[in-house]
Amino acid sequence: MKGRWLTIVLVVLLAAAALASLLAGRVWLSPGEVLASLTASDDSLARLIVTELRLPRLLLAIGVGASLGLSGAVLQGLLRNPLAEAGLLGISTGAALGAVVAIYYGLAASFALATPLLGLAGGFAAAALAFGLSRSGGTLALILAGAAVSSVAAAGLALALNLAPNPYAAFEITTWLLGSLSDRTWDHVWLAAPFMLVGCGLLFLTAPALDALALGEAQAESLGVRLARTRLLALTGTAFAVGAATAVTGAVGFIGLVAPHLVRPFVGYRPGRVLLPSALLGAVLLLVADIASRLISYDTEIKLGVLTSIFGAPFFLWLVLSMRKRAP
């Protein structure tokens, strides 16, 4: 019952945040203006702002936030590690490296979608490498393989910044790595949405296995859970969902870590029941952060990844301290 009420509350919060996302910005709109712009066929300023700027940004924020929250919940259940999220397995860093390659070699300047496309390729390559390296091992092998892939990709990012051919390229790489939803268009939505939908679908399929894995790997196997299949579903789903998310927004941290922990006490700590609330809360958190990035008055826009890190880092510290208190 708690889980059902939690889902309803999160849906209401998501609807409220979505409405606020359409209203808020440098040009504030009223609810009536937003409704009129969605139904009108003229070329008014309000319609252009809503349909060409804020609506694609809203849909991407929901998809990216849900992908990050859901993937974090699945990986925490799969690895039985409270600090697990897509970055632990190198998928986010791999996607970031792929996008940076597009910027470094000037492909982004000649083809607008080169950055997200190569970002997707980087995410898939990182997931495939992590799975291949850990295929004959268990959970620990997967974590170590992910850490190795993440380190290699991070080294590649540092090398690209070090060897940037000009200051403009270095600025573009740095700006993209900070994460943002500004200037995203319908092309980014159509590119990323199918991958995020497929990825989230694969991640939801792991729910029964995650419940069994809470008892331990040996016990889960005795109940008929195929661990290799579950790992493959989790990694492939994360590669699709988080790879696409990172490819279009840049690096956005902490959503995948925070969302599952916030909802877990309300669902009885059952891993399978954490998935849907984590996806909804991830979407809410990212939408709120995106709205804040527009409203905070400063000389330059505070990037989305910076805001999530500012609010996520204290939570991370609190989580570590609370785990230390519970340790025997």
Image (cartoon, rainbow, N blue to C red):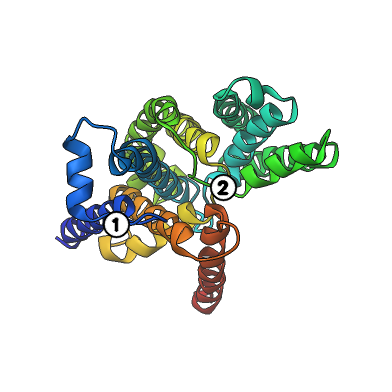
- Marks 1 and 2, how far apart in space? 21 Å
At 68% from the left and 37% from the top, the residue drawn is 149
| x 45%, y 57%: residue | 294
Dot 1 crowding, Cα within 10 Å, few <14, some 14–19, many 20+ = some
Report the mark closest to the observer, 1 or 2: 1
Q: Amino acid at mark 1?
A: Ala
Residue 309 picture location, percent across and down: 56, 61
Q: Quadrant of the N terminus?
A: bottom left
In this image, 113 relative to 290: left or right?
right
At numbered mark 1, what does the secondary structure look like: helix, strand or loop?
helix
Q: Is residue 139 left or right of residue 280?
A: right
Give the residue displayed 63% in from the left and 37% down from the top.
96
Q: Who is closer to the viewer here, 89 or 132?
A: 89
Q: Is residue 208 left or right of residue 174?
A: left
Farthest-out residue, top: 110
Q: Which residue is mark 1?
A: 20
Position above or below: 113 against 69: above
- Residue 10: x percent and y percent? 25, 57
Q: Position of residue 135 (x, y in %)?
A: 59, 29
Identity of the residue furthest to the left in this view? 1
* Any part of residue 252 in sight: yes
Front-lying residue, 216 or 232 = 232
- Does residue 240 sit above or below 110 in this rendering? below
Residue 164 coordinates in the image, percent (x, y):
81, 36
The tag on residue 43 is none
Q: What residue is shown with label 2?
A: 179
